Amino acid sequence: MKYLGVFFLMVLAFGCESVDSENPVVYPSDMQEVYKEMVSLSESETCSDSTQWLFTAYGSKACGGPIGYIAYSKKIDQDYFLGLVDRFTELQAEYNQKTGAVSDCALAIRPTGVSCENGKPKFIYS
């Protein structure tokens, strides 16, 4: 989840882009709206039974691959949530391409599962 904070700061830093009418740039504010809704839905359920939680990759690094993973409860509208994840990933990929963004090219480590701690999902890496 530490990548979420870094990404959000990046989005804020690039928030004042000018628009080229022939080559429109995906506004970071669009990504922020989708991101906020995605995270809000992810955090809408209390984690008390880890068997009721899944995770998925999200985002698009400039040199390929996801920027991280996000946990979600099986109790939410999974199709809607995964649609938000896909939309955010598409918006970020478009933004990266149109702005010539660069990234660290480090691979986001895939969790092996989800546990519940203090009502929140926590990734397991083993």
Image (tube, rainbow, N blue to C red):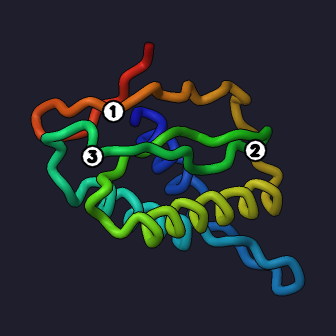
Query: The N terminus appears in which quarter of the rendering?
Result: top left
Up-down relation of residue 81 to residue 100 (above or below): below
Which residue is depicted at the point 74% across and 72% down? 25
Disc on the earlier residue, 2 or 3: 3
Q: Which residue is mark 3?
A: 52
Which residue, as the protein is rendered here, is positioned at the far top?
126
Disc on the earlier residue, 2 or 1: 2
Which residue is depicted at the point 55% across and 73% down? 30
Q: Which residue is mark 1?
A: 114
Up-down relation of residue 20 to residue 102 (above or below): below
- Secondary element under disc 3, as helix, strand or loop, is helix
Examine the rendering and report whether any part of residue 33 can be seen: no
Q: Which mark is residue 62?
A: 2
Q: Residues within 10 Å of mark 2 (few under 14, many from 20)?
A: many
**Image quarter of residue 125:** top left
Comparing 87 with 3, the one in front is 87
Q: Which amino acid type is shown beneath numbered disc 3?
A: Gln
Q: CA distance from mark 3 to mark 1?
A: 9 Å
Judge left or right: residue 45 versus residue 34: left
- Secondary element under disc 1, as helix, strand or loop, is strand
